[in-house]
Amino acid sequence: MRKLFHILLLGIGALVFSTGALARGTVPVMNVENMEAANLGDKPLTAEQVSKAVYSALSARGWSAQKAEGNKIRATYTRGSHSATISVTYTAKTYSIQYVDSSNLKYSQDKGAGTIHPTYNSWIKNLKTGIDTNLRSF
């Protein structure tokens, strides 16, 4: 009985260790491509309104943003020793979020597909949710 208990305990320990190791792995980089810039009203949005929605969401989530050329915004988020830089492009009808660079997020590119720490994708999902919420307020 005691031997069975030790085997069971060892198995549970191995499961916990392997789950923790997987959680720290990398995942494909999340880019947001041509998302519809939609509001709840009948009136179409302007590029200026989409820009305001993006800047507001970036600011609310702690991203530092700078206007780039045309309808493009470059933004950086820093948390401790980790940082990510993105490019947000927008029109009156769509917006996109593209990975640009990062530090200490285990980014690597293999055969054209980038991978990164899952936390980066969480930051992007939260940003997308914020932009979509802001767009609906117009």
Image (cartoon, rainbow, N blue to C red):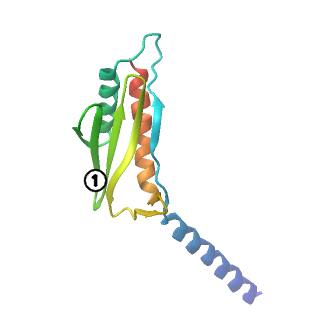
Quarter of the image with the N terminus is: bottom right
Residue at 35 percent of width and 25 percent of height: 50
The residue under label 1 is 78
Q: Residue at x 40, y 62 (%)?
A: 107
Q: Is residue 20 above or below residue 137?
A: below
Compare residues 50 and 14 and report the one nearer the observer.
Answer: 50
Quadrant position of the C terminus in the picture: top left
Q: Is residue 17 left or right of residue 107?
A: right
Q: Pinpoint residue 63: horizontal percent, then vertical percent.
A: 28, 43
- Label 1 sits on a secondary structure element that is strand
Residue 74, x across and y down, in percent:
27, 42
Return the x and y of residue 59 as percentages of the image width and height. Answer: 27, 37
Q: Horizontally, is 78 left or right of 124 in the view?
A: left
User: Horizontal placement of 138 versus 14: left or right?
Assistant: left
User: Where on the picture, by quarter, is residue 109?
Assistant: bottom left
Q: Nearer the viewer, residue 11 or 99?
A: 99
Q: Quadrant of residue 45?
A: top left
Crowd rating for badge 1 (residues with CA inside 10 Å; few <14, some 14–19, many 20+):
some
Q: Residue furthest front?
A: 111
Residue 63 visible in this rendered orientation of the protein: no
Amino acid tagged 1: Thr
**Residue 105 lies in what quarter of the image?**
bottom left
Q: Residue furthest right?
A: 1
- Total label count? 1
| Residue at x 43%, y 10% (from the top left corner) | 43
Give the farthest residue toward the top.
42
Q: Position of residue 103 (x, y in %)?
A: 31, 61
